[in-house]
Every structure is written in C-alpha cells, then in structure tokens.
Amino acid sequence: MEQANQEKKLKLYSHWISSCSCRIRIALNLKGLEYQYIPVNLKEGEQFSPEFQKLNPIGYVPVLVDGDIVISDSFAIFMYLEEKYPQHPLLPSDLQKKALNIQAANIVCSSIQPFQNLAAQKYIAEKVGPDEATPWVKHHIEKGFEALEKLLKNHAGRYATGDEVFMADLFLAPQVHAAINRFTVDMAKYPLLARLNEAYSEIPQFQNAMPENQPDTPSTPSTRALFNFKLVD
Ligand SMILES: N[C@@H](CCC(=O)N[C@@H](CS)C(=O)NCC(=O)O)C(=O)O
C-alpha cells in the first residue's frame, strides 16, 4: 500500500528559473498537492538527454508525471490538474471570466514566454548577434504587457480578473517576476501588473513557487547571474 502511494505521488520535472514550471508549482501549491521535485538543468542541457526527451520530445520543462500519466506543456498540465484535482478551482464558472483568464494566460504562454525561452535567446544571439537577444526579449515582453494592461483594466480586482486568484494570475506572476529580475523591464509603465505583482508577493503558495525558493536554485549570486538572473542577497 505504502509502495502504491509512493508510486502514485506526483512528480514535476522542473527548473528553478523556468517560468513555465513556476505556473505549475503555483497550481500544485494552491491545490494542496504534494509532489516530488525533479530538477532538469537547462543550463547544462539536460533537456536534450534521450531519457528526458522520452518524457517530452520537444525537450522543455515542465513535465508532470501522475502515476502512469505523463503530461508536458504547462497549459495542458494546468487543464489536467484542474479536472483531476478540482479542489481550489483555478478557472471561474462564469463563462466570460473563464475566457478572459484563458486569454490572459495564453498571451503569456504563446505571445511572450516563447520569445524569452532559452532556445529562442540562443538562436537570436547566434544568428543575429550576442547583444541582440535581450532587446528582442524585452520588446516582446513590453508588447505583451501593454496588451495585458488594456485587457485587464476593467476586470481586475485585487487579482487579475477579480478578487480571487485564477488561472491568469498563475501565468502572470512568473512572467512579471522574470521581466523584473531577468530582463530589467521598467514596471512603472505597467502599473496594474506591478500592483498585481505586489499582491502575489503576499501569497505563500506563490512565494514558495518562485525561482529563488526551489531545491535547485543556485546558492550563490554569481551562479544565479550566469542565468541572467539578478537577485539581491
Ligand atoms: N509551451 C511550453 C513551453 C515550455 C518551455 O518553453 N520551457 C522552457 C523553460 S520555461 C524550457 O524548457 N526551455 C529549454 C530550452 O529552451 O532549451 C509550456 O508552457 O510548458
């Protein structure tokens, strides 16, 4: 019995700085689901190992293993968790609000994060120039943030779509965190997102999921800086 429970335990393949993994860490925390954290070192190229690519052929984290079920892609994992573990719903029942949450999450997921992904940054640095990757990332973050400010302006409460935490917040929190800490985006231009970020910093389930608090977070500032990640110690 003990063994069966052990085997059933959720496993999350994750990397400390990965904003896609962070979305799922927040979802698991809010739903009160314990999981085994399996680090995949993206800097060392562990995502390209044949073993990992058996789990996710495109070689990206996060990957969730739930018993015999293996799911990759944070959006798919989110939808799976929401149905399989309905406690603390992360999508509202109101249809319009639900669509708004999916739209905001998808702006982050499809129209911002892919441009800041390691693979994209490496490609730009190699093909265009080593100093071109960061401006390219910032351009896409800022374009997305402008849209999100407009989209959420008339819907936000304490959180992105009202006074309860929903899907949009899980996607926004790691994205804003990355914008500030990795890409030094000036958040004064995005007052709503800056305010939401403050609100997220007060929720333990969000804080526990953030890059600086993971089992594989490098302990020294110089190592973290190698990831373009500026943290004050
Ligand atoms: N759409 C995927 C994107 C996954 C993704 O881009 N993961 C990044 C970390 S956030 C990664 O593993 N990058 C490794 C690489 O670029 O080689 C999702 O939402 O999970």
Image: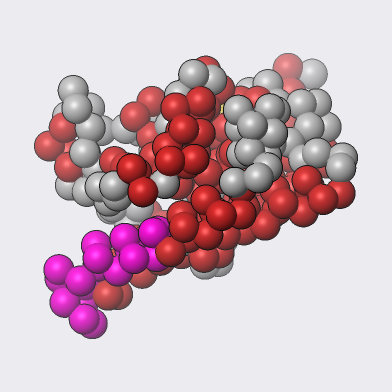
Q: Which residues are magenta?
A: 125-142
**Image: 153 above or below 198:** below
- The number of numbered discs placed on residues in the rendered structure image is 0
Residue at 87% from the left image edge and 40% from the top image edge: 93
Dominant SS in magenta? helix
Residue 225: image quadrant is top left
Viewer-closest of 191 and 32: 191
Left or right: 223, with 23 as reference point: left
Single out the residue that lies furthest toward the bottom: 127
Q: Looking at the image, which is closer to me, 231 or 69?
A: 231
Which residue is at 24% across, 42% downward? 229
- Residue at 78%, 47% (x, y): give it: 98
Residue 138: image location, x then y, percent: 31, 60
In-image side of 6 versus 63 (left or right): right
Q: Residue at x 72, y 51 (%)?
A: 100
Q: Residue furthest front?
A: 154
Q: Is residue 158 left or right of residue 58?
A: right
Expressed as whole percent of the image width and height from the top left, the position of residue 105 reads 62, 52
Q: Is residue 77 magenta?
A: no
Colour scheme used in the picture?
secondary structure
Give residue 49's position: percent from left, percent from top.
41, 60
Is residue 136 one of those drawn in magenta?
yes
Split into 4 quadrants, where in the image is the C terminus?
Answer: top left
Percent coordinates x, y for residue 171 in the rendering: 56, 45
Q: Can residue 11 be seen here?
A: no
Answer whether residue 111 is visible to the viewer in this image. Answer: yes
Indicate whether 112 appears above or below 124.
Answer: above
Q: Is residue 135 left or right of residue 65?
A: left
Q: Quarter of the image containing the N terminus?
A: top right
